[in-house]
Amino acid sequence: MPVPAISVIIPFLNMRRFLADAVESVYAQTVSDWEILLVDDGSDDGGAEAAQEYARRDPARVHALLPGPDDAHGASAARNRGLRIARGEYIGFLDADDIWLPDKLERQYKVLEESPRSAMTFARVHYFFDNPAEGEGWDQPFAPLEDRIYDPPELTVAFLRDANIYPCPTATLIRRSALLSAGGFEERFRKVRTDMAVWAKLSLNFPVRADSAFVARYRQHGQSSVALLFSDPAAHQKNELEFWSWLLGYLDRFPDSIRREPEALTCRQVLRLIQADVTKGKSMGALAWRRAVLPRVLRFPAFRREARWLRMLLPRGSI
């Protein structure tokens, strides 16, 4: 069986009603040198059966991956399952509720072929509502980014400063070798921050090519993982603290020239999240606050590395 240039990984969990739109947008691409890996994360809405039907119709190019009894669950684990059996030199991720524009793969394949030192390219999406009555949608912003190759840690810093500009998985194309070298997706993140964790890993280790073009439509609806998590503030707060704490630990492996700027941004976020977690909206005296917060932040080498973080010894609100 010929090895495809691109492996398209479509993870899904109870998204049968949208799956056809996603799959058909791959078939509508202006290039056809691809395979589709439909990765079920434990659906009970008939999505697994729909995926198997697609594989039956086109067995040479479409494969359905159903979860085994020992498989981990979550968006990161599902993407990693697809990555492990992907054969293409390039990996394209397509969320089951999103839609690619017809020239997405052709454009991004060309970008990476012309940028051999780039591990990944990303472009923009247009956000649209599943229910048009909810609004007209909007274009993902790009500024202050430019159409060029970014070396570490430029993009990491830009993404940490502005979550609106970091890539949607649907709008990326990645060299499989680079993604495997970076360790794939962090499976501790099951729903959100699954993407930012892997973008941090890639943009800290490799050059990345930014592209201001639009390559996909990103569907907004009430059952998306982001919408569900934001509806639960406590779960969202916990997830954010877990992500920023993981990132602070991950940054420890890099030399100061790569680590310094993203580490400063991350320390500030970790401190604020720990403060919020400790106080939970309640008033605390300065001494009680310091006793509660300091042991939690000083376990990170980053907070012990620079004298400026000793300002944490000052009363709450001084940082």
Image: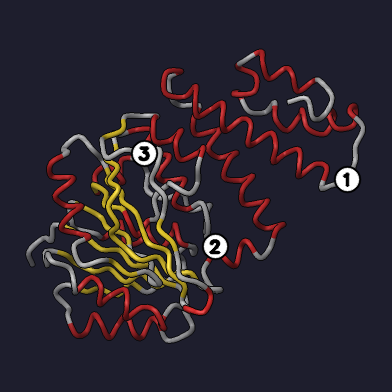
Q: Residue at x 57, y 45 (%)?
A: 243
Q: Secondary structure at mark 1?
A: loop
The CA distance from mark 2 to mark 3 is: 24 Å
Earlier residue among tags 1 and 2:
2
Q: Secondary structure at mark 3?
A: loop
Could you tell me residue 126's position as x and y percent? 38, 62
Image quadrant where one finds the C terminus: top right
Residue position marked by numbered label 2 in the rendering: 226
- Determine whether label 3 and label 1 are within 8 Å by CB: no
Q: Residue at x 51, y 37 (%)?
A: 161
Q: Nearer the viewer, residue 155 or 260?
A: 155
Residue position marked by numbered label 1 in the rendering: 282
- Determine whether label 1 and label 2 are within 8 Å by CB: no
In the rendered structure, the answer to whether residue 270 lies left or right of residue 115 reads right
Residue position marked by numbered label 3 in the rendering: 145
The CA distance from mark 1 to mark 2 is: 27 Å
Could you tell me residue 159's position as x and y percent? 46, 40
The CA distance from mark 3 to mark 1 is: 39 Å
Earlier residue among tags 3 and 1:
3
Front label number (3 vs 1): 3
